[in-house]
Image (cartoon, rainbow, N blue to C red):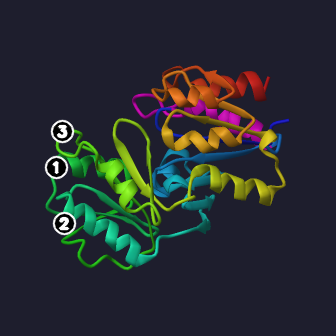
Amino acid sequence: MIKAIAVDMDGTFLDSQKHYDEVRFNQQFQKLQDKNIKFIAASGNQYAKLRSIFGDKEMYFIAENGAVIYQGNSLYDYKSFDIQDYQSLVQYLMLEQGLREFIICGLKSAYILKDTSQPFKENAHFYYHQLEEIDSFNVLPDDDYVKIAFNINRTTHPTLDEDMAIRFKYIASLVSSGHDSIDVIMPNMTKGEALKGLLTKWHIKPSELMAFGDANNDKDMLALAHYSYVMANSNDSELFDIAHAVAPSNDEQGVLQVIDDVVLS
């Protein structure tokens, strides 16, 4: 019996235009509530971005790849980097790798540098609804830091993610949400680990969990859930070995199809 459903956002719940069938989902969500089935948005995205997608629904949000958990509008739990470790990551990207276009992600807000390109700023503002532009990363704003996000240019920095993973293996892990989009997160701080904590609190077994994903940062979440679905549009071949089934693509509203067919039928 399915008692909880965890869903990735980009490439999974949202279609290629970053939309979903709101009318259909709202009907489903009410039926899930009636059955006491918990619905969790599990994403690398910022909580404010997730909240903008779902409005004021009373549901759980696993944000920033597992570092931040909200229950509705209330902060439920979070874990942040040691500030000295985090500063060393920021300085490595800036001073040793010569990067300026990356996002430092805190609990209160995300931050980018003012003197970055307009396309980078527009993309950052799309994904981070709480975002400040600041003059320098030399002294970080007063915040609890949970992630660094950047896109790798494989022409100029072909092995940046591999180099960084080796250099900082004791203080950080790197995961990808696809297309060379990299999140630097704390070791063992993933969507799957966050879900394990919630399941324990709810007295729900992994055999009662349904999960959907399409990218590398969904791997442990899909490995945890008994009812695990990789999206047909996924480009990560490993997920097809891990997941128990394949859902129709995100552009076919595959998540909603499976919920209708498997959970609500």
Q: From where the camera sits, is residue 238 visible?
A: yes
Near-viewer residue (206 or 56): 206
For residue 128, above or below residue 108: above
Residue occupied by mark 1: 118
The amino acid beneath tag 1 is Gln
Q: From where the camera sits, is residue 150 visible?
A: no
Where residue 155 is drawn, which disc sits there? 3
Q: Is residue 16 magenta?
A: yes
Looking at the image, which residue is at 70% across and 28% down? 259
Residue occupied by mark 2: 95
Mark 2 lies on a secondary structure that is helix
Where residue 76 is drawn, which disc sits there? none
State which region is magenta: 12-33
For residue 232, above or below residue 217: above
Q: Earlier in the sequence, mark 2 or mark 3?
A: 2
Asked whether the residues under the numbered discs 2 and 1 touch, taking CB atoms below 8 Å apart as contact, a structural biologist would say no
Which one is in front in this view, the residue at disc 2 or the one at disc 1?
Answer: 2
9 to the left or right of 264: left
The residue lying furthest to the front in this view is: 166
Q: Is residue 13 magenta?
A: yes
Mark 1 lies on a secondary structure that is helix
Q: Residue 158 appears at what percent x and percent y? A: 24, 42
